[in-house]
């Protein structure tokens, strides 16, 4: 279900929530849904956008920024998180990095592009298998508080937390 006229613009709410919560950096590997929000982040004076060449590199950069004291979000596609396996368990989880991961959830019934479907099927079972804490955004509730709750969970639990986003949540 797409946002109706008069509804808040969900991608703007995501960006505004990150700014309000003091995120100083966003690390990303581009995805079709993420392109325009990445441009907005790049032009946001209070944040630094770091573009990585692949997802495990993005994870390492995000952990390094966080180690340096910068509140950091990781913005990637679900397939990218699936490819982070070793880095997720041997770096981010092992050393308890409180990273907010905003993840475009490709391959769901709302995104039936044939080559994304296997990724969609594997996402949640793999997340559970590696012990990655996650939640799916509820499209019937405002997104800003959901991003804030995810960020708070990551901080309080000292662990990465993945918030799975639909197209309407993240595509500008």
Image: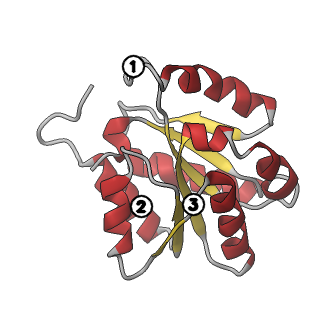
Q: Please report the residue visible at 39 percent of the width from the left and 23 percent of the height from the top.
A: 113
Q: How many marks?
A: 3
Q: Earlier in the sequence, mark 1 or mark 2?
A: 2
The label number, if any, that marks residue 17 in the structure image: 2
- Picture coordinates of residue 166, whole percent (x, y): 40, 35
Q: Check the picture and name the quadrant holding the N terminus.
A: top left
Label 3, secondary structure: give it: loop
Label 3: few (<14), some or many (≥20) within 10 Å? Answer: few
Label 1: few (<14), some or many (≥20) within 10 Å? Answer: few
In the image, residue 55 sits, relative to residue 40, either above or below, namely: above
Q: Please report the residue visible at 59 percent of the width from the left and 56 percent of the height from the top.
A: 151
- Picture coordinates of residue 164, whole percent (x, y): 52, 38
- Picture coordinates of residue 56, whole percent (x, y): 69, 54
Q: Please report the residue visible at 58 percent of the width from the left and 37 percent of the height from the top.
A: 79
Q: Earlier in the sequence, mark 1 or mark 3?
A: 3
Q: Earlier in the sequence, mark 3 or mark 2?
A: 2
17 left or right of 134?
Answer: left
Q: Can residue 3 be seen in the rendering of this structure?
A: yes
The label number, if any, that marks residue 1 in the structure image: none
Residue 72 vs residue 17, the one in the foreground: 72
The label number, if any, that marks residue 53 in the structure image: 3
Residue 137 vs residue 79, the one in the foreground: 79
Gap between marks 1 and 3, in whole Å? 26 Å
Q: Nearer the viewer, mark 3 or mark 2?
A: 3
Gap between marks 3 and 2, in whole Å? 26 Å
104 left or right of 83?
Answer: left
Gap between marks 1 and 2, in whole Å? 29 Å
Q: Which residue in the protein does label 1 denote?
A: 112
């Amino acid at each position: 279900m797409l946002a109706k006229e008069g509804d808040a613009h969900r991608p703007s709410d995501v960006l505004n929530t990150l700014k309000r919560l003091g995120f100083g950096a966003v690390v990303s590997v581009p995805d079709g849904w993420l392109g325009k929000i990445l441009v907005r982040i790049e032009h946001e004076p209070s944040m630094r956008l770091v573009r990585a060449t692949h997802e495990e590199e993005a994870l390492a950069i995000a952990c390094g920024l966080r180690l340096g004291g910068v509140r950091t979000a990781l913005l990637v596609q679900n397939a990218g998180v699936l490819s982070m396996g070793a880095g997720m368990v041997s770096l981010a989880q092992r050393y308890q990095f409180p990273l907010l991961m905003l993840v475009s959830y490709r391959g769901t019934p709302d995104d039936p592009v044939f080559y994304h479907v296997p990724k969609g099927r594997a996402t949640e079972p793999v997340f559970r298998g590696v012990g990655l804490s996650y939640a799916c955004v509820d499209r019937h509730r405002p997104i800003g508080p959901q991003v804030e709750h995810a960020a708070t969970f990551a901080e309080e639990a000292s662990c990465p937390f993945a918030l799975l986003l639909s197209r309407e949540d993240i595509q500008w």
